[in-house]
Image (cartoon, rainbow, N blue to C red):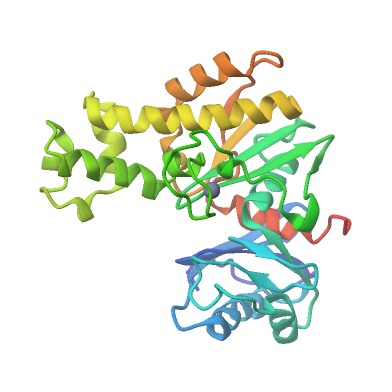
Amino acid sequence: MSADRAAGVGAGAAVTLGLDLGGTAIKWVALREEIVVASGSAPTPRSGAEAVVEAMAAVAVAAGPLEAVGVGVPGLFDPDGTSHGLHNVPGLKGRYPLGAALAGEVGAPVRLANDARSFTLAELRLGAGKADRHLVGVTLGTGIGGGVAVDGRVVLGRDNRAGELGHQTVDPQGALCGCGNRGCVETFASVPSILAGAARAVLQGVDTSLRAACGGVVSALTPVMVTAAAADGDPFARDVIDRAGVALGIGLANVCNIIAPERIVVGGGFAAALEILRPSLEETLRRRARPVGACPVVAAGLGQHAGAVGAALWTREPLR
Ligand SMILES: [Zn+2]
């Protein structure tokens, strides 16, 4: 556990714990009412599902008396708390009774939520969208996550699956996506897709500053190298970034036309890319969200712990 856990969290009234389970880190917050009284992160164990549960339980025990625990997961889950398809979390690719296992360890109710829907709920209630009733949340990272709020509630849909903005088709003949479809927004705008586009430019021998940036070793390319090269005017890096912005803009325009949001909030591990994506993203949004009109696209208000805050808030939402 990181050292930023506030001393004495365990003293006093019970807290609601929010855990944001990722492939490399478990971020957490302790909420009292709507105030974050402590936060931190712990590395995600590499040795399997039971170790992941133990790591989350250790955070929970240290947080003190608990009202409830919410867990934002990067994938799917059933109403009984069985997770599945958490491809990025070691040992949790298949079906696993994550909710029950954690509840057994911590002695408090545990509710699972999708991580991007958690991000969206947090931004809707306490973050950049707190003045809005109709909001779209997007998380940029290894994948493109999403959440949609209508009339002040995050829409969950059948089996909690609504909001998969990253899996809208923008190119019917495009690259295969992890979901099995072709040409999803995610195949243009996720970090691996952007890196693949940059690597292709280097390998094809085009005249790009990315070659020098990575020393000619494409596996050494990082997202920051690509965004920095694009910002410096490298035409090939700019092209990769602009194609990502256009794809994301098409996906967001589709959602605008359907729910007419007041705002789009962008977060996730690659959220810093928003400003470099913004010109192509906003132009596409303006051109394609014609019936409804574009809305402001803003950075998340709650920082890197938004997902954990939302996971905690889900424990207070009515079951539906
Ligand atoms: Zn997809």
The answer to whether any part of residue 176 appears in the image is yes
Compared to residue 243, the image places residue 195 above or below, namely below
Instruction: Give the residue drawn at x 60%, y 39%.
Output: 301
Location of residue 196 with respect to 20 vertically, above or below: above
In the picture, measured across the screen, residue 87 lies left or right of residue 116, that is left
What residue do we see at 26% from left, 41% from top?
A: 198
> Where in the figure is residue 312, as x and y percent of width and height?
72, 60
Where the C terminus falls, by quadrant?
Answer: bottom right
Res. 10 image quadrant: bottom right
On the rendered structure, is 314 left or right of 190? Answer: right
- Name the residue located 79 percent from the left edge and 53 percent from the top edge: 158
Image location (x, y in percent) of residue 249: 53, 27
Residue 22 against residue 199 in the figure, above or below: below
Q: Position of residue 145 (x, y in %)?
A: 58, 47
Q: Residue 11 placed where, x, y %?
A: 72, 74
Residue 107 placement: quadrant: bottom right
Residue 9 visible in the displayed image: no
The image quarter in which residue 57 lies: bottom right
Q: Is residue 292 above or below residue 167?
A: above
Q: Residue at x 39, y 30 (%)?
A: 243
Closer to us: 84 or 47 = 84
Q: Which residue occupies the foreground of this view, 68 or 21?
A: 21
